[in-house]
């Protein structure tokens, strides 16, 4: 097995509220090698965005965390902002949800793509301009568009420009937070194909955050299905599709085909005992309501946190 480029070990995140703390991320473990695609999948509020913001050191001041995020074996969170700043954008970069929010309306696209290069000493002046043009071409935008403003771009072009900006300093890991939100299905497919091409051509490791499990396979070979701040199931995409071992994974596949998942995710400040998915699960047994299932290995690379995982073999239906 290849040496991990990125490792996340027992990562926890709490958010401080007036009534106490909310445990938003609960013991996340992930590994990622160069050129690999990993999907973080689940409904809103399951901890996906919190996880990648923690990896980037971009959590708000109300958050506290424990655990490790290792890049090439170095814990980049060890000294807080002092240590993570050296890796942000140069080793790990992020494409934020909603590309319009990633750009200032009063600066050109080219100037904004060049800004991180100047900030981190990667390039300046004519060299930065050349690099901006190269990046725009890489994501399928004519270099002449560098002089345009964000409002002059379509939604799909803004998303491509946001990816170009994330690549400005040559990162090894790209964290993409719902990069196809609010785009029509044709443009969504184009953006996903672009991420997959960049992964293959640049050896870029990609973490794709999405609520749509069926589309993850366009970019990722593996996926971690998250629920209530935990990983419910983790496996290669093919295994998840053919042999899901968690009812929530099966429900997400069914949702991609138009089926409704009954109920709503639990509030993290009022999490029920036992399995977090039990109130919405049609297979619930008595122990599911009282015992939290651990994430256990079923086979090489396939883990599930379900008491019934061993009996769920045989597909997603």
Image (spheres, rainbow, N blue to C red):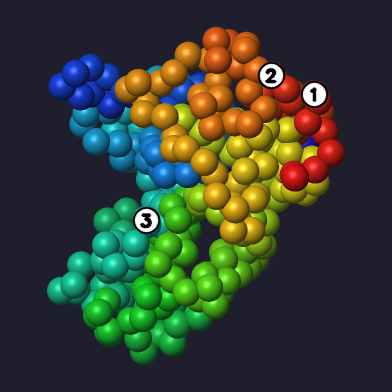
Q: CA distance from mark 2 to mark 3?
A: 35 Å
Identify residue for label 1. Answer: 310
- The image shows residue 199 at horizontal and vertical percentages of 62, 60
In contact (CB < 8 Å): disc 1 and disc 3: no
- Write the residue at 44% across / 18% down: 272
Looking at the figure, which quarter contains the N terminus? top right
In contact (CB < 8 Å): disc 1 and disc 2: no
Above or below residue 236? Residue 304 is above
- The image shows residue 303 at horizontal and vertical percentages of 70, 29
Residue 307 circle label = 2
Question: Callout 2: helix, strand or loop?
Answer: loop
- Write the residue at 47% across / 38% down: 263
Indicate which label's residue lies in the foreground, 2 or 3. 2
Above or below residue 31? Residue 21 is above
Residue 10: in sight, yes or no? yes
Crowd around label 3: few <14 · some 14–19 · many ≥20 (10 Å): many
- The image shows residue 243 at horizontal and vertical percentages of 79, 40
Q: CA distance from mark 1 to mark 3?
A: 38 Å
Residue 2: in sight, yes or no? no
Identify residue for label 3. Answer: 96
Q: CA distance from mark 1 to mark 2?
A: 8 Å
- The image shows residue 55 at horizontal and vertical percentages of 43, 37
Crowd around label 1: few <14 · some 14–19 · many ≥20 (10 Å): few
Q: Closer to the N terminus: mark 2 or mark 3?
A: 3
């Amino acid at each position: 097995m290849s040496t991990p480029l990125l490792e996340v070990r027992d990562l926890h995140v709490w958010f401080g509220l007036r009534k106490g703390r909310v445990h938003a991320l609960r013991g996340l473990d992930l590994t990622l090698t160069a050129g690999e695609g990993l999907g973080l999948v689940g409904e809103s509020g399951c901890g996906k965005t919190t996880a990648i913001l923690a990896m980037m050191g971009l959590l708000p001041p109300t958050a506290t965390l424990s655990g490790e995020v290792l890049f090439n074996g170095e814990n980049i969170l060890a000294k807080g902002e002092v240590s993570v700043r050296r890796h942000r954008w140069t080793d790990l970069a992020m494409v934020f949800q909603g590309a319009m929010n990633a750009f200032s309306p009063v600066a050109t696209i080219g100037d904004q793509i060049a800004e991180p290069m100047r900030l981190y000493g990667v390039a300046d002046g004519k060299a930065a301009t050349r690099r901006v043009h190269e990046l725009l071409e890489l994501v399928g935008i004519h270099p002449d568009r560098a002089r345009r403003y964000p409002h002059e771009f379509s939604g799909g072009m803004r998303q491509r420009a946001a990816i170009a900006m994330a690549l400005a300093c040559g990162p090894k890991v790209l964290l993409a937070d719902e990069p196809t939100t609010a785009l029509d299905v044709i443009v969504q497919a184009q953006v996903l194909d672009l991420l997959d091409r960049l992964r293959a051509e640049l050896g870029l490791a990609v973490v794709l955050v999405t609520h749509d499990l069926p589309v993850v396979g366009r970019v990722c070979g593996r996926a971690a299905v998250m629920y209530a701040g935990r990983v419910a199931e983790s496996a290669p995409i093919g295994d998840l599709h053919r042999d899901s071992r968690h009812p929530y994974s099966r429900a997400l596949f069914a949702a991609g085909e138009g089926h409704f998942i009954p109920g709503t995710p639990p509030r993290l400040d009022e999490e029920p005992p036992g399995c977090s998915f039990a109130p919405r699960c049609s297979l619930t047994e008595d122990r599911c309501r009282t015992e939290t299932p651990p994430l256990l290995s079923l086979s090489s690379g396939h883990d599930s946190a379900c008491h019934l995982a061993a009996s769920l073999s045989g597909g997603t239906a």
